Amino acid sequence: MLAQERHELILRSLRRHGRLRVADLVDELGVSAITVRRDLAELDSAGLLRRVHGGAIGTSAADQASPGNRLTIGIVVPSAKSYYSDVIRGAEAIADRYGARLVLGVSGYDVTAERERLDKVLGIGVAGLLISTALGDGDADRMDSRLDDIDVPVVLMERAFGFPDVGREYDHVRTDHAYGAMLALRRFVALGHRRIAINLQSTVTAYWLRLGIEAAAKALGVEVFLSPVDLPAHGEDPGAVAQLDAFLAECESFGSRAVLVHSDEHGASLVERAMDLGLRVPEDLAVIAYNDVTASLAVVPLTAVCPPRRSLGETACDLLLRKLQSPRTPTQHLSLLPTLNTRTSCGTAEQPLPR
């Protein structure tokens, strides 16, 4: 059967049923799944249907207005709280603007759970997928190949890995966290600090922060100390107090009165313990946090590097929906710059360092 004949049969079946499944078309046309997917991709490019995971739906105004066929896109993220709540809201706002529906899956940073969430989200027939994978760029060599099996457009969020860790290049939108580290160190240098202590949690963001800190320290000519102490997010129990004290002792030994802490909660705990020990913030210890989700609520409001979380969700969703409208759009790798929100915890240029 010629391709043109198959295309006519596919469109006729779509008009009859409103939605098509690849498996059904394989049986109906007597061809392979690869051939069917190629046919659907060609018809999608021609604007005659819209591919979704596992099949296709129509593109007419009536089709889109139908609740069953409304354009639906999936979003799978490690968490629906804190950092990612703003990302989700940004994506949702853009989906609403396009008249699309957003379906959420949460992995909890667990690879097995992520696979299950993907199966459920893709199983409803989404037209495209936004995903921030459970594993980050530093662990890309352990990536699940499930990503390469997805047969609809995919946009990665806060992830930038590509070949050879995955089989093809993906559109991605991510925060330039290395630039965020530069913002923090540059602020400390402007305030007269030349030795800076760093405490990072074991997160995906930390991978990029380390790269940025190394480059920024070299460019600014400052010394940095990357602490191995695992700071607690809350410092009430004896074990947490001991960890906070250990880090403060490292700062004193290194001769640092400036600290970059990831994340807000850990920075807030550090400030409270420092004050318990009689240290003044920012006069004796200047602190900058990274994330700026709860930084302004600390006992001493924390100066913080703020990733553009909502804008990231908006940009990623807009990129995906434009890709669905124009499948030949080139693959894009987009980086968004964070900002530095200055508050009390790191001081100002008018506050000279104590001698």
Image (cartoon, grey):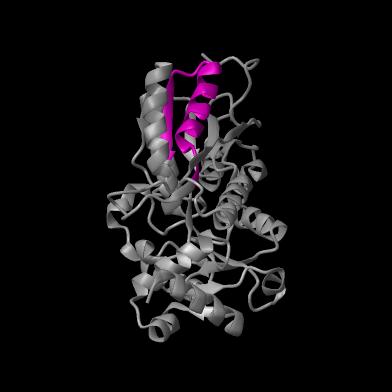
Quadrant of the rendered image containing residue 35: bottom left
**Residue 19: percent from the left, percent from the top?**
56, 79
Q: Is residue 113 visible?
A: no
**Image quadrant where one finds the N terminus:** bottom left
**Residue 266: percent from the left, percent from the top?**
51, 45
Check the image and report above or below for 287 versus 50. above
Task: Tell me the residue at 44%/45% (across/down).
Answer: 205
In front: 48, or 23? 48
Q: In this view, does 109 lie to the left or right of 277?
A: left
Quadrant of the rendered image containing residue 292: top right
**Residue 65: percent from the left, percent from the top?**
72, 72
Q: In this view, does 289 lie to the left or right of 101?
A: left
Check the image and report above or below for 20 versus 213. below
**Residue 155: percent from the left, percent from the top?**
49, 54
In front: 149, or 339? 149
Q: Does the magenta stretch include residue 188?
A: yes
In front: 303, or 51? 51
Q: Give the range drawn in magenta.
A: 173-199
Task: Tell me the residue at 54%/25% (across/down).
Answer: 284
Q: Is residue 197 magenta?
A: yes
